[in-house]
Structures are given as C-alpha cells and as structure tokens.
Amino acid sequence: MGTKKQILILGGGFAGVYAARHVERFLRSDEASISLVNQENYWVDQPLLPEVISGLIGLTDVVSPIRQLCPRTQLVMREVQKIDLANKVVTVSPGFRPRLLELPFDYLVIALGSISNFSGTPGMVEHVKPFRTLSDALNLRNHLIHALDEAEIETDADLRRKLLTFVVAGGGFSGVEVVAELCDFVDKVRQNSPGLRNEKGRFVLVHAGDRILPEMSESLALFAHKLLAKRGIEIRLKDRLVGATSEKALLKSGLEIPTKTIVSSVPSSIPQVLEKLDCEKDGGRLKVNANLELVGYEGCVWALGDCASIKTVSGNRTPPTAQHAIREAKTVAKNIAAVIRGGPSSPFAFEGLGKLGSLGHYSAVAEILGVRISGFPAWLLWRAIYLAKLPGLRQKVRIALDWFLVLLFPPDFVQMRVVREAGIARQHFEAGEVVFFQGDLGDNVYVIQSGECEVLRETNGRQSHVAMLGPGDYFGEMALLSDVTRNATVRARTTMDVVLVSKNDFEALKTSVPAFGDVFRKLAKDRSAANLETHQKGSSAA
Ligand SMILES: Cc1cc2nc3c(=O)[nH]c(=O)nc-3n(C[C@H](O)[C@H](O)[C@H](O)COP(=O)(O)OP(=O)(O)OC[C@H]3O[C@@H](n4cnc5c(N)ncnc54)[C@H](O)[C@@H]3O)c2cc1C
C-alpha cells in the first residue's frame, strides 16, 4: 500500500457533497483523506428553495450540515481564492486571523457551481434580487413581507401599485418556480391582510426565448404557460430585463414596469476564481473529457456540476441540473478510486431520467422516461421524487412534515430580520493586545478613538519601534492601498478603542469619493518616505 493520498473537493453543493459521499464509500480511510472547501457549513437543496419563499418549507429544512452528510470528510469553511494546478495547492480565504491558508492536494475535484452575474447591466446589482442561495431566498421572503406590509398602509395609489407589482426575469425552471411560489405567497398574505383583500397583485415573467421552460417539450411548456396565465401571471416572451432602478424594471422592448420587486434567475457564470484558472474552457465553463477529467490535467483534476462543460458518451451536453450533478459525482469518485488503486476510468454516460417543474398551487409539469404528465398527478410525482432524492432520513421527515403541516395551517408570514453587519464597526483592545501582525492580510483601516498603540517592524529578526499613534490617528491603510500584507505589527500601549472600516467599504469609499482616497494615499506616501529615512539612518525609532 502506497502513502495516503489527499483528495481535495472544492464546493459543497450537489456535485461536491455527493462526490465526497461516494469517495467515502469507494475508498477506505487508510487509502485517502478527503477535505472539502465550502463557503458555508451546509448543503442547500436548491430545487426546493422556491418553496422557502412561500413558507411551504421552513428555512432551515432546506439545508443539511455537510459534516453529517460526509462524516469522514474534513470541512474547511472558507472561500477558495486561488487554485494553483501546477503546484497542486489551493489557497483559501483567512478565518478569524487574517492569514491565507494553503491546502495541498494529490487529487482535486472542482465543483464550485455557478454564480448570478449582473455586472454590465445598469442598476441590476443594486436593484435586482438574485435567487440562488439560502440567503437570497431569505432576503426575498423578507423583502416580500416588508413590501406587502407597506402596501397595506400606503395611501399613495402609485406607490401601492409598485409595492404590489413583482417582476421575475428568466422563464427557465427556476424562474417559473419562483414566480409561481411568489404568486401563491402574495395571494395567501392578501387573504390574511384585511387592507389588501380587495387588491390584486401584478406578476410579470420576462423571458428572452419564444416559449417558457425551454428545458421541457413544447406541449408541457404550453401547458405551464396557460396555467400561469390563468392564474394572472403576465408572461412576456422574446423580451428581456435590460436595466433596473429602485422604482421600475426596464425591458428591451422599451416597456417600463413600475415596481419595487425585481427577481432574476437568469445570467450565471462560473465563480471568478475559476474564470482566472489557467485551463481550457468551453462556453465559459471548465472543459472536461468523457471521464470528467479537466483537459490538460488528466488523472489529477476533475470538474463537474454547473461549473463544468460536460458531454455524455452520446455527445449530448449535460444541462446544469441537480440530477446530473449527482450522477457526475459518482463517476468522478469511481474514477478517483480507479486512479488510486490502478484500474480503468469510466466515462460519464447518464442521459437524464426526466424533468420536473413545480408550478405552485398543487400543480406541476413532468416528463419522465418520455412520458409527459401535468397538473396534480405531476405535482404528486414531483413531491414523491424530491422526497426520495433527499439525502438522510432527518431531512426527508422534516420536509414531509412541512408539506403536511401547510395542509392544516396557513404558512407563517414572520419576517426574519437578520442584523446587518454595520459598514463601520468598533473594537476595544486591552493594553498589550495585538491589533494585527506583520505579514497578516490587510482587512481593515483603523481610526483611534481613544488610547494609544505602537507600530513595530521586524527586519532580519530584529524588532524596531516605528511610531506611536494616538486619538484621531489612523493606520492599516498601506496594506489596503497596495494590496500587500501588513508591513508592521500594531500593538495597543494602553486600553484603546478604534473604529474600523472594512476593506470592501474602504474600496467603495475610495472609488466613489476621490478626496477620501487622496487623504489616505498622501498619508501612505508620507509614511513610506519616513520609513525609508529611518532605514537609511540605520536607526530604530524605539
Ligand atoms: C432556484 C433553483 C431551482 C432549481 N431547480 C432545479 C430542479 O428542479 N431540478 C434540478 O435538477 N436542478 C434544479 N436546479 C439546478 C441545480 O440546483 C444545480 O444544477 C445544482 O445545484 C448544481 O450543483 P453544483 O454542486 O454544481 O453547484 P451548487 O449547488 O451551486 O454548489 C456550489 C457550491 O460551491 C460553493 N462555492 C462557490 N464558490 C466558492 C468559493 N470561491 N469558495 C468556496 N465555496 C464556493 C457554493 O457556496 C456552493 O455551496 C435549480 C437551481 C436553482 C438556483
């Protein structure tokens, strides 16, 4: 038996988590150790997310802890920042301590999914709500409850109309499911709100193609179209969202829809860290061969799920769906085991069993093994299949209970206010405590409110005193302005209170208020010049 191999999996969605589960099954713990990097410590069942909007499923029931799903896998809850394929190292974001962490690997599985990418369209980043993650679902639900509460007491008729108008961009599976759930939810809230009972909501689904649900056969898509239209949802085909403000949605056709709620499930791209990856891409996704190995890195790196461009043995391109990601994960795990134990790799051969889409209101469309079903039977089938597919008995029971309880009680309309982290925070230090160390990453700029600190620099193993700072002084800007690590350690001399501005907020202020950036640039320049002088004199200021 050779040395134990290190398998590193990037991404904790369908593709990553199922890959880890299968590797755990196929390889013994003395053959390989498995680590998985994901931004969150939970796995999200994305196909069930739209039901979180209407409260059919409880917020936490749609997620499962990754540690429970993959008990033999070490979870690293950080963000992947850099993948160095040549040196077989992945760099992840800092944790509590502002230091990068490097994770070496023998075998790498890339399963980072895709992201909502609104850049390039005016007002989209600011005013359009993405729908992909658990926090997107929570934000949208909170926003809807807020908009409906406001509509109930609003006396200005125009604003009231805007508050009751909802625009969803994208007529694929997720857009259709979102608009259907949104419509159901608003209807239920209206029934329970005396001030809204006589009001009608306006729901607009905008789709660039000539029919919704392009993933389905034409007849089922038509059925879904008619059903949604009957429910009062306006469907605008061959049109697209081209801009947004806080007051309206702007469509390519020139139509402007006054609204306070715009949701988009459309444009997606691979995460930035993968865009930067030096490897072949196909249609913006990572190019893999038939065995799901990254082209150019065969036998060492695999890519799967929404971030990969995959063709099956029959030459069909696999769609970005959960059912494909799960099967791809099994192929990848099998092939890693084959490489470690020695044996042939298998190509990915799954062609898909069928397609299911919920339309809310106890209705769905399904196409299973060539058979088309719609309406209530499709809805029952949809529920049965999704329940069966859920990993772990605990989640199956929780979701089944959620679905049963809404038949007995109305869903709750509680707005879960999550405390937003303030852009400017405060910190307190006792004398002797270190604010940051030389070599740490620059994460904040500090302004001293009270107390004092000293700046210390280590050169050739010798520590020298650079400066003393007091109330009104600021520090920490150099690492942020030049994007380098801290060039000194800062330690509190007395008890000290500081105000800190995070890197992101600092960047935003610097870009939008030039005078703000100028102050810090001048300060950094003066400090650099002073440091140089100190070094030239060969003295330390201690
Ligand atoms: C609303 C909605 C409804 C859907 N409905 C269906 C459906 O009915 N049927 C179906 O088959 N499919 C459906 N899909 C598609 C399906 O969910 C995806 O195809 C599937 O989730 C892809 O799995 P994945 O693992 O590739 O990506 P994801 O599930 O997106 O997982 C990627 C993971 O990587 C993590 N990640 C990304 N970047 C980083 C980084 N830099 N550092 C660390 N972690 C990172 C993310 O946090 C995430 O956990 C739906 C999708 C959505 C959004």
Image (tube, rainbow, N blue to C red):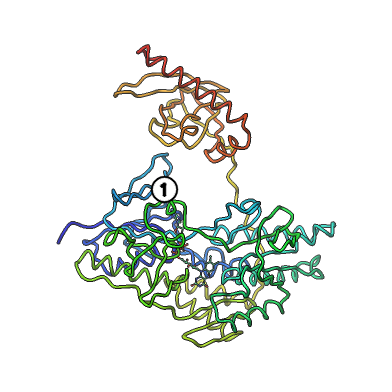
Report if residue 542 is visible in the image: no
Q: Is residue 463 left or right of residue 342?
A: right
Q: Is residue 46 left or right of residue 200?
A: left
Graded by Cα atoms within 10 Å as few (under 14), some (14 to 19) or many (20 or more), the crowding at tag 1 reads some
Which residue in the structure is indicated by mark 1? Answer: 81
Looking at the image, residue 211 lies above or below residue 459: below
Q: Quick one: quadrant of the C terminus?
A: top left
**Tag 1, which secondary structure?**
strand
Residue 2: give x, y in percent of width and height.
Answer: 16, 59
Answer above or below: position of 172 versus 515: below
Q: Position of residue 47 (x, y in %)?
A: 52, 70
Disc 1, ligand 1: is the CB inside 8 Å? yes
Amino acid type of the residue that numbered disc 1 sits on in the rendered structure: Gln
Residue drawn at (56%, 64%) of the image: 59
Percent of width and height locating residue 33: 27, 58
The answer to which of 290 and 144 lies nearer the viewer is 290
Vertically, is 431 above or below 21? Answer: above
Residue at image coords 74%, 69% = 192
Q: Is residue 486 above or below residue 16?
A: above
Q: Quadrant of residue 302?
A: bottom left
Q: Quadrant of residue 15?
A: bottom left
Q: Residue at x 65, y 74 (%)?
A: 409
Question: Is 318 or 33 nearer to us in this picture?
Answer: 318
User: Which residue is most to the bottom?
Assistant: 371
